[in-house]
Amino acid sequence: MDIFSPIVHFLTDKTRKLSSKAILVILVVALIFLLDNLFSFSYYYNSSQKINQLNQISSVIQDKSLSDKERNKVLTIRSEILEHKTLKDYTYNYLTNLNFETSQNETNEIENDGEITNLALEHKRNPTIHFLTSAWWILITAGIFILMFPFVLLTDRKQLGAMIGGFIVLGGISYLFALFLSKVFSFIPLIYGEPIYNYVLNVVLSSLILVSSIFYGRKSKKTIANNG
């Protein structure tokens, strides 16, 4: 429990801002999510549970006293167990599946023999370019950290484990935030039927988030310095 004491103390400290506490909670949740993805704790547990349930169902199916209707119900249950996904699976699938949107005006203007070619229009938008333009500064920062990381390890080997752990956690959080930005910007309709305008808008909006974060960080430091 000593590991969680600093976290509990931080969350119960009335002098701490609510925004700082919210950020800590988000970081802890992201860390748990990252560790679970790295070591697959929930995956192996869920797989083990599914195998046990499927073995039990197989025994039930072999029961000759079952009617065809009952056997079909058992088979349906087996299919549901195999296809069952966790909240983590749904979350990751939701973030990685980009839902490019097209405005209603554009879909009404672009027709082919009376059929809306919305799907063909949206295929113009490249998911890779969309991701890069949505999270450009996160990717650049990550690249700089990757290039600097070997040199940092050479200068201070005493904190090797802590630095590697921090690097993994920071990388995981950055990746999740990049996916989040990419997902949010995917809801912006295709502008004038050309994806280049969306890519430019992605860069602009992402830059505004970066500038706002820097401004908020500096303002918070000044507030802490004045209070101190």
Image: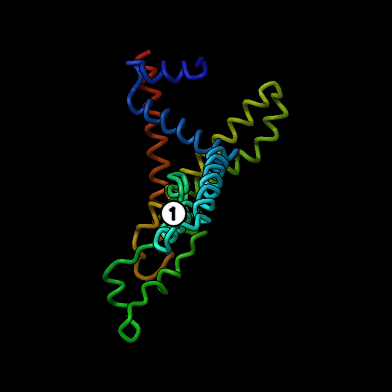
Residue 170 in the figure: left or right of residue 95:
right
Residue 149, given in percent of the width and then of the height, sits at: 65, 35
**According to the image, label 1 marks what residue?**
77
Binning the other alpha carbons within 10 Å of mark 1 as few (below 14), some (14 to 19) or many (20 upward) gives some
Instruction: Give 43 or 19, whichever is nearer the viewer.
Output: 43
**How is the rendered protein coloured?**
rainbow
The residue shown at (45%, 46%) is 86
Q: Position of residue 137 (x, y in %)?
A: 50, 45
- Judge whether 193 appears above or below 177 on screen: below
Name the foreground residue: 217 vs 21: 21
Q: Quadrant of residue 141?
A: top right
Return the residue found at the far bottom.
113
Can you see residue 98?
no
- At a point 33% along the width and 23% down the height, the residue shown is 17
Q: Amino acid at mark 1?
A: Ile
Q: Nearer the viewer, residue 12 or 135?
A: 12
Residue 34 position (above or below residue 226):
below
Residue 74 locus on image (x, y percent): 44, 56
Residue 167 position within the rendered picture, expressed as x and y whole percent measured from the top left: 59, 34
